[in-house]
Image: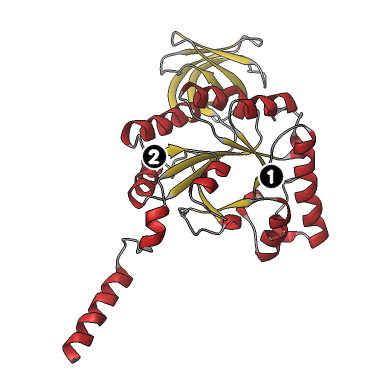
């Protein structure tokens, strides 16, 4: 008897310390490996860059829109939102003014959540789910969100599955940085597939950053950029320390390219590509297609349906 109790105790200790997740078999049986891409805030690059990337690969994503920023510089217009929806994208609420919802009174919460949804629906868009600004929520925020939306997305760098709380969906950033590399994102995709779970990835403005030398003249914000001889095109955002940040509209800029501002005539020599989020998105989608052809890329609303999250 004592030996039996000892063995059970050892097994319990091993399972408690293991890094392999212990999942309810019933939950695993109903679960599916899924990936979702959500673009937060409603930047114009959702339409000018991401739409074609996803459409060319037979996929769609979700865009979370701050309604107070619609039809303003660098953000989506109503017609662009309609174009995304026609391409199969999901339009999500993201409040009117992008506040930290945990800092608001209940009346203010009601206003932000109801008015943003009403504005989007007034533009002829179908809206069922939302993203919490800064990924911040609490019990009060989630309770009021449930009055207007089917689900709410937060952060926490975790996976979702059948049985997840629809008003506390987990997500991870897929924006690249010195600390956040493509290998990390691919590892999350691998894990979601292995565990038959739902990975939600998010990012904001789709941009690129390069190091240049031999700069001549001053680039103008918003002007077009040409990259030769690669033939790539972009839209200038701003200068950094011997660098340029821009929207990568087409092609792939290469070291050795001459970068030229189409209206300013400014120029420079491309020395190094720090990151290119257009190319990164293509790589992520194609990684899923190549390695996990049965892993679906879905919108938030479709993921909720497939995993029967209610």
Q: Can you say whether 114 is above or below 175 in the image?
A: below
* Residue at horizontal 68 percent and vertical 29 percent from the top: 81
* Residue at horizontal 38 percent and vertical 64 percent from the top: 24
Report the quarter where the N terminus lies: bottom left
In-front residue for pair 90/277: 90
Q: Quadrant of residue 91?
A: top right
Counting residues from the start of the chain, the first of labels 2 and 1 encountered is: 1
Q: Position of residue 82 (x, y in %)?
A: 69, 27
Q: Secondary structure at mark 1?
A: loop
Q: Quadrant of residue 21?
A: bottom left
* Residue at horizontal 26 percent and vertical 72 percent from the top: 14
Q: Which residue is mark 1?
A: 94
Q: Position of residue 223 (x, y in %)?
A: 65, 16
Q: Quadrant of residue 301?
A: top right
Q: Secondary structure at mark 2?
A: loop
Given this view, does label 2 or label 1 mark the residue nearer the observer? 2
In-front residue for pair 229/36: 36
Disc 2 residue crowd, few under 14, some 14–19, many 20+, Cα 10 Å = some
Q: Which mark is residue 46?
A: none
Horizontally, residue 166 falls left or right of residue 105, namely left
Q: Which residue is mark 2?
A: 295
In-front residue for pair 134/236: 134
Horizontally, residue 38 falls left or right of residue 146, namely left
Horizontally, residue 196 falls left or right of residue 38, namely left
């Amino acid at each position: 008897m004592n030996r039996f109790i000892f063995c059970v105790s050892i097994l319990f200790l091993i399972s408690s310390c293991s890094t392999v997740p212990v999942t309810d078999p019933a939950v695993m049986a109903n679960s599916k490996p899924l990936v979702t891409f959500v673009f937060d805030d409603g930047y114009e690059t959702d339409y000018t860059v991401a739409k074609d990337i996803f459409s060319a690969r037979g996929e769609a994503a979700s865009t979370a829109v701050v309604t107070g920023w619609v039809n303003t510089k660098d953000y989506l217009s109503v017609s662009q939102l309609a174009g995304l929806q026609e391409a199969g994208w999901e339009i999500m609420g993201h409040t009117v003014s992008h506040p930290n919802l945990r800092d608001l009174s209940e009346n203010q919460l009601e206003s932000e959540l109801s008015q943003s949804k009403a504005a989007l629906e007034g533009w002829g868009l179908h809206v069922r789910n939302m993203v919490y600004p800064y990924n911040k929520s609490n019990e009060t925020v989630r309770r009021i969100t449930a009055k207007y939306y089917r689900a709410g997305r937060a952060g926490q760098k975790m996976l979702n599955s059948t049985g997840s709380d629809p008003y506390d969906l987990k997500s991870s950033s897929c924006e690249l940085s010195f600390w956040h590399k493509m290998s990390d994102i691919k590892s999350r995709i691998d894990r979601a597939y292995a565990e038959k779970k739902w990975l939600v990835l998010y990012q904001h403005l789709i941009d690129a950053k390069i190091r240049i030398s031999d700069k001549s003249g001053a680039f103008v914000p918003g002007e077009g950029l040409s990259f030769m001889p690669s033939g790539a095109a972009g839209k200038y955002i701003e200068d950094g320390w011997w660098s340029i940040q821009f929207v990568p509209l087409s092609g792939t800029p290469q070291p050795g390219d001459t970068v030229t501002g189409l209206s300013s005539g400014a120029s420079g020599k491309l020395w190094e590509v720090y990151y290119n989020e257009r190319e990164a998105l293509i790589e992520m989608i194609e990684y899923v297609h190549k390695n996990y052809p049965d892993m679906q890329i879905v919108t938030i609303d479709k993921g909720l349906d497939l995993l029967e999250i209610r």
